[in-house]
Image (cartoon, rainbow, N blue to C red):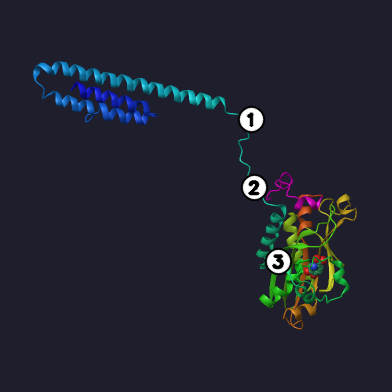
Amino acid sequence: MLESTQTIKEQFSLLLDKAASTAELESLKVEFLGKKGKIAALMNELKALPADRKREAGQVINQTKQLIEQRLHEKTEELAMREEQRLIEAAESYDESLPTELSLGSYHPITLIQREVEQIFASMGFYVEDYDEVVDDYHCFEALNIPKHHPARDMQDTYYLDNGQLLKTHTSAAQNYIMRKYGAPVRAIFPGRCFRNESTDACHENTFFQLEGIMIDRNISISNLIYFMKTMLSEVFRQDITVRLRPGFFPFVEPGFELDIRCTICGGAGCPSCKNSGWLELCPCGMIHPNVLTAGGIDPEEYTGFAFGLGLTRLAMMKYGIKDIRVLNSGNLRALSQFIDA
Ligand code: DAH
């Protein structure tokens, strides 16, 4: 019996030293002091002892029990103190000046304006289409009534690839593909990234975005073109926009126009943004040339249509008041993250 209490004490000491949490202390308590614990088992053995040894053995067991209780209590206190200390240290090392707000990502202004224009046109029944950035000469020029050696090719400093293909210089490159895909009648817009070998300044970039659109049906006229452009621009600028058409030359439209909008900043009175003219040049457009319809497999005797090539980058700059186009491709998060979906 005495030996057993000695072994129990040793076992307990070993386990107690290792215990590092109140949960572990709790299970030690159950193991040694619980109803089915080691001390209780000794007490049971006590019954079998002759009366003269019972008293002495009982005392030893009780002392062992008290010792275990005492040491469990001490260790519980010790752990509690350590935890308190840990919390104080954690609180002291907390730096209140650290930023606590998580910074969320934001959309690029081009993405914002593109989505907005897409939604507006989609609500007017236009398909939204995607097209390649690497295209062939046929789609970028020839199908658009710009034959080889045509002087209009000089308007675009094209990046040619070694394999004879090229980086799309304008979104018009998708016109033929869309006509072939849907036939007539069709209304579709196709935004895209374009590339031209331009030297860059505040207004020019070698990489920029356009959003092209075509609408082909029977009896489409210039008034349809004006209606759709006016509606779209009034929604984008959240005000009634006045537009005007000036003649412009593009081989793939006849007649071709430059579409201007009345300056949204001065209302037409003249200001630095519109170079005192009261108008802002925004979007070349026109009635699709019969040759382009024919190349797209559409009979120009039966169908007519309009096309426009909205400068998406320019539109974003106007809407968000961005003065230097280079900011858009800069990857400068401080500048780019300030635009929100209005
Ligand atoms: N593709 C022309 C350019 O980038 C812009 C253009 C002009 C597109 C007239 C059109 C259009 O659809 O009708 O210079």
Image location (x, y in percent) of residue 214: 73, 70
* 3 or 1: tag closer to the N-terminus: 1
Q: Please give the residue where the numbered disc 1 appears in the rendered image.
A: 97
Q: Please give the residue where the numbered disc 2 appears in the rendered image.
A: 105
The residue lying at 75 percent from left, 72 percent from top is: 136
* 2 or 3: tag closer to the N-terminus: 2
The amino acid pointed to by label 3 is Phe
Q: Is residue 248 visible?
A: no
The residue lying at 17 percent from left, 24 percent from top is: 43
The amino acid pointed to by label 2 is Gly
Label 3 packing within 10 angstroms: few (<14), some (14-19), many (20+): many
- Asked if residue 340 is among those painted magenta in the image, a careful observer would answer yes
Label 1 packing within 10 angstroms: few (<14), some (14-19), many (20+): few
Rendered view: 255 above or below 208: below
Tag 2 near tag 3, CB within 8 Å: no
- State the separation of the CA atoms marked 3 and 1: 48 Å
Residue 211, located in which quarter of the rendered image?
A: bottom right
- State the separation of the CA atoms marked 2 and 3: 26 Å
* 1 or 2: tag closer to the N-terminus: 1
Label 2 packing within 10 angstroms: few (<14), some (14-19), many (20+): few
* Disc 2 residue lies near ligand 1 with CB under 8 A: no
Horizontal relation, residue 117 to residue 43: left or right? right
Q: Please give the residue where the numbered disc 3 appears in the rendered image.
A: 190
User: What secondary structure is marked by label 2?
Assistant: loop
In front: 11, or 284?
A: 11
- Asked if residue 338 is among those painted magenta in the image, a careful observer would answer yes
User: What secondary structure is marked by label 3?
Assistant: strand
Rendered view: 98 above or below 188: above
Horizontal relation, residue 73 to residue 65: left or right? right
- Residues shaded magenta: 324-342
Judge depth for marks 3 and 1 and give the one in front: 1
